[in-house]
Image: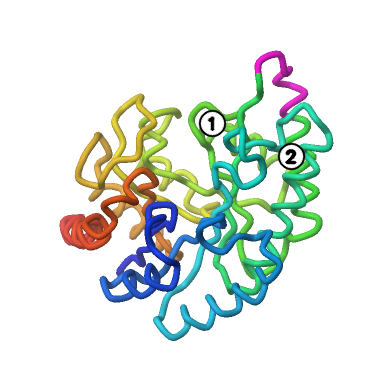
């Protein structure tokens, strides 16, 4: 089987969304990882649902499937990156994060998305980690209660430095919040975690809601082009193929929007070559 690739719009921030979708389709991508943000489908825009309907129609015309990403940096607070989260000390802040994720899920349904991906957040200094874990588990269960069982997967992404940092943390959460899947960023495995990227794919194959690939150096959380860093890309793609993974495999180059015109075609070519070598 051939894998299906998508490109994250957080690496296309200098492109209009309509232009980005056409560009991806022309380069041979099977889908788009749509990061809801002020530049691409602002979920808080008065006409967000209408925009989502238009995006879905355009994706249908172009043959693109969709994954919804929720990691925009300043969407909820223009002065604090990624805040508030489920591990914010303020109950009001945690409620805002839950309301946003529920909105993202509503838009995902309009978009016909395969998955909605989200992460835990970073507890601030002075926040008790056990308390933060309880807040996060409560928030995830509330999200599953209101949006679980729909056609898309609710996928929690382990992020280096966050409360849920690696696949083992995810497994602990999954035991407390049934109904979630794993959003596995294979590059993160060389930064934090007990598994090589291809080992994580094999071990958690039955729980994968969405998968991301990129280059990453061991111990350094910096998203790099696919042909840089310490990730064995052919091994990752071989593991995904062996697992019969049939959802989108997404690429996140969030710091490379200024050269997306180069990275979009370069990346799909790298993926094809790596898959042929897998």
Residue 134 locus on image (x, y percent): 77, 30
Q: Is residue 199 magenta?
A: no
Quadrant (top left, top right, bottom left, bottom right) of the N terminus: bottom left
In-front residue for pair 67/134: 67
Residue 75 locus on image (x, y percent): 61, 47
Total numbered labels placed on residues in the image = 2
Q: Is residue 131 magenta?
A: yes
> Which residue is labeled 2 in the image?
176
Local SS, label 1: loop
Q: Quadrant of residue 94?
A: top right
Spatial CA span between label 2 and label 1: 16 Å
Range drawn in magenta: 125-133
Depicted 205 relative to depicted 124: above or below? below
Q: Please tell me how crowded label 2 is: few (under 14), some (14-19), or many (20+) other residues with Cα within 10 Å.
A: some
Quadrant (top left, top right, bottom left, bottom right) of the C terminus: bottom left
Q: Please tell me how crowded label 1 is: few (under 14), some (14-19), or many (20+) other residues with Cα within 10 Å.
A: many
Query: Which numbered dot is residue 278?
Result: none
- Which numbered disc flags the more N-terminal residue, 2 or 1? 1
In the image as oriented, which residue stretches furthest toward the bottom? 61
With 103 as the anchor, is 193 left or right in this view? Answer: left
Residue 10 locus on image (x, y percent): 44, 52
Which residue does the image show at 70% across and 20% down from the upper left? 129
In-front residue for pair 44/155: 44
Query: Which numbered dot is residue 165?
Result: 1
Which residue does the image show at 51% across and 53% down from the upper left? 208
In the image as oriented, which residue stretches furthest toward the top? 126
Which residue does the image show at 56% across and 64% down from the upper left? 41
With 118 as the anchor, is 89 left or right in this view? Answer: right
């Amino acid at each position: 089987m051939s894998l299906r690739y998508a490109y994250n719009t957080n690496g296309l921030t200098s492109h209009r969304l309509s232009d980005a979708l056409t560009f991806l389709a022309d380069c041979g991508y099977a889908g788009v990882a749509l990061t809801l943000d002020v530049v691409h489908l602002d979920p808080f825009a008065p006409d967000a649902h209408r925009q989502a309907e238009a995006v879905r129609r355009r994706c249908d015309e172009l043959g693109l499937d969709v994954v919804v990403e929720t990691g925009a940096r300043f969407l909820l607070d223009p002065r604090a990156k990624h805040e508030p989260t489920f591990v914010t000390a303020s109950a009001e802040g945690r409620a805002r994060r839950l309301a946003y994720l529920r909105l993202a899920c509503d838009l995902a349904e309009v978009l016909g998305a395969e998955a909605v991906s989200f992460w835990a957040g970073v507890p601030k200094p002075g926040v008790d980690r056990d308390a933060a874990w309880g807040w996060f588990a409560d928030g995830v269960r509330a999200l599953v209660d209101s949006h679980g069982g729909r056609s898309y997967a609710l996928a929690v992404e382990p992020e280096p430095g966050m409360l849920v940092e690696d696949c083992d943390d995810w497994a602990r959460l999954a035991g407390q919040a049934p109904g979630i899947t794993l959003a596995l960023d294979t590059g993160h495995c060389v930064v934090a975690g007990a598994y090589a990227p291809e080992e994580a794919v094999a071990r958690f194959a039955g729980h994968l809601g969405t998968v991301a690939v990129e280059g990453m150096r061991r111990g350094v959380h910096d998203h790099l082009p696919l042909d840089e860093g310490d990730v064995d890309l052919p091994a990752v793609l071989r593991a995904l193929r062996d697992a019969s993974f049939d959802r989108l495999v997404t690429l996140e180059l969030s710091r490379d929007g200024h050269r997306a015109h180069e990275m979009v075609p370069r990346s799909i070519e790298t993926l094809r070559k790596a898959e042929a070598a897998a």
